[in-house]
Image: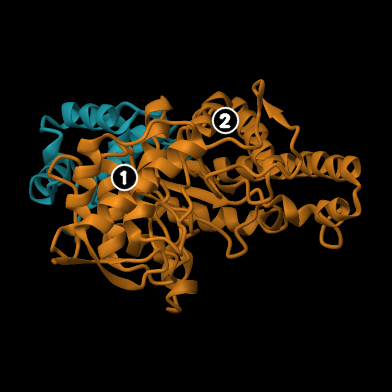
Chain colours: A cyan, B orange
């Protein structure tokens, strides 16, 4: 679907975390982002959204959230627990 | 008479006329229906498959809006070990994310078996920790139950493949049951280590490679892992379309495991707590691509209809209508992917 070029990583998270079928997972993400399901795979639309939300994108600008920093934001945005984020918070004393 | 370029199941290019392609599509779906006791594809679906097969484009794709996500079962080996590029797995995963636009990936040891990872879990966990710090997409840890590794001389259990030809059926069954216990312990142990390393999920891959006991070991391990780590995602991928009855009498959730096809396998996976199920349909290299395609789509469609969880159809060399070749032709792979998603209703690949 395009991974972090589009919204593929986010849709995949809903399948893995909640066992959602593809259309349900796409709808969940589309509703959270305020786009149509078709736009989720459109890298032109998604790059701007990902930049605005600072949730990670390819060829990032200096200062953009990367790796675990982007995932902290994704967990908040999607309302899900991301295992590595939970561990990071514990290990860094944030939780 | 017009002829269309297509492939054999081993990837060899051939030209077939419309009548032969239509005949092979019908025979392929009929074969799957007969073996799996599932419905054949409809005439409209077969007509659409004909369109996909005979399309003049090199690489086919789904219609806009029908895109699906991908998961993997290769341990991040494609760039380093397989393409033979000097690169560590953690870097390879970043390349998959930032350059190749993967939706997720699995990290794994080159031996890709849980038993082997047991001795090096601490080192594998450190790689997973680094990967999790540097990536955004979901990253799972993958390996195979690979029950055969628990047999002598490499493992503690008698070899059932040696016992069976001697007529020692009971001994063979006991050996497999013993191997299940060892394998479950290892899979749960490694899942715990990977959970603590921040993995997004575990991929139990190539389940059934050693027969029905191999599948049961994976299901029992998944059940325990989900109980201990309810937030951990679980993907279960199969080794073949049909569970071979090396034991023959093992049950899970009240169903005999030997002989099950994908639409029944997924029911057991759901019971165990699997998040994503990866069915396999074997490619017959002696038959044409249209025959294999119709057959694979028939099985995957029945599986996706039976499933309440997402289904990621395996589309690699020798499975999911993909030709059995080390370098599967992209015209065939892309057509298989399109058909499995649009007609088979796969939730991912």
Q: x and y percent of residue B195 in the render?
A: 55, 40
Q: x and y percent of residue A49 in the render?
A: 12, 42
B284 to the left or right of A23? right
- Say which chain tag 1 marks: B
- Residue B204 visible? The answer is yes
User: What SS does tag 1 mark?
Assistant: helix
B122 to the left or right of B62? right
What's the distance in space between the residues labelled 2 and 1, CA to CA? Answer: 32 Å
| In front of the other: B293 or B87 | B293
- Residue B349 visible? The answer is no
For label 2, count other residues whose C-alpha is less than 10 Å away and answer few (under 14), some (14-19) or many (20+): few
What is the number of callouts on the image? Answer: 2
Disc 2 designates what residue?
A: B229
Number of the label disc, if any, that sits on residue B340: 1
Q: Are marks 2 and 1 in contact (CB under 8 Å)?
A: no
Q: x and y percent of residue A45 in the render?
A: 8, 45
Mark 2 and mark 1 lie on one chain; the one further toward the N terminus is: 2
Q: Which image quadrant for residue A84? A: top left
**Residue at 48% in and 47% down:** B280
- Say which chain tag 2 marks: B
């Amino acid at each position: 679907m395009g991974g972090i070029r589009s919204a593929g990583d986010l849709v995949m998270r809903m399948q893995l975390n909640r066992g959602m079928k593809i259309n349900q997972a796409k709808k969940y993400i589309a509703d959270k982002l305020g786009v149509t399901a078709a736009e989720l795979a459109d890298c032109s639309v998604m790059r701007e959204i990902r930049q605005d939300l600072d949730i990670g994108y390819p060829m990032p600008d200096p200062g953009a959230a990367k790796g675990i920093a982007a995932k902290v934001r994704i967990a908040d945005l999607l309302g899900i627990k991301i295992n590595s984020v939970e561990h990071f918070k514990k290990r860094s004393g944030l939780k | 008479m017009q002829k269309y370029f297509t492939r054999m199941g081993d990837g060899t290019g051939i030209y077939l006329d419309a009548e032969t392609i239509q005949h092979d599509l019908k025979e392929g779906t009929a074969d799957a229906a007969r073996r799996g006791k599932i419905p054949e594809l409809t005439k409209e679906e077969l007509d659409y498959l004909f369109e996909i097969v005979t399309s003049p484009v090199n690489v086919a794709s789904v219609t806009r809006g029908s895109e699906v996500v991908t998961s993997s079962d290769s341990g991040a080996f494609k760039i380093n070990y397989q393409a033979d590029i000097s690169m560590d797995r953690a870097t390879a995963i970043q390349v998959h994310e930032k350059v190749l636009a993967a939706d997720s990936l699995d990290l794994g040891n080159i031996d890709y078996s849980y038993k082997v990872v047991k001795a090096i879990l601490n080192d594998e966990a450190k790689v997973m920790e680094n990967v999790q710090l540097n990536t955004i997409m979901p990253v799972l840890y993958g390996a195979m139950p690979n029950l055969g590794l628990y047999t002598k001389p490499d493992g503690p259990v008698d070899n059932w493949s040696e016992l069976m030809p001697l007529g020692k059926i009971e001994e063979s069954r006991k050996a497999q049951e013993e191997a299940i216990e060892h394998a479950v312990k290892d899979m749960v142990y490694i899942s715990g280590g990977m959970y603590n390393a921040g993995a997004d999920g575990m991929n139990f891959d190539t389940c059934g490679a050693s027969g029905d006991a191999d599948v049961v070991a994976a299901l029992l391990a998944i059940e325990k892992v989900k109980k201990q780590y309810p937030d951990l995602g679980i993907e279960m991928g199969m080794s073949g379309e049909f569970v071979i009855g090396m034991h023959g009498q093992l049950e899970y959730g009240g169903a005999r495991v030997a002989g099950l096809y994908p639409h029944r396998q997924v029911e057991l996976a759901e019971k165990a707590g699997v998040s994503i199920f990866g069915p396999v349909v074997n490619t017959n290299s002696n038959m044409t691509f249209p025959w294999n395609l119709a057959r694979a789509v028939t099985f995957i469609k029945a599986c996706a209809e039976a499933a309440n969880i997402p289904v990621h159809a395996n589309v690699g060399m020798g499975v999911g209508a993909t030709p059995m070749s080390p370098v599967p032709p992209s015209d065939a792979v892309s057509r298989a992917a399109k058909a499995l998603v649009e007609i088979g209703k796969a939730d991912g690949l």
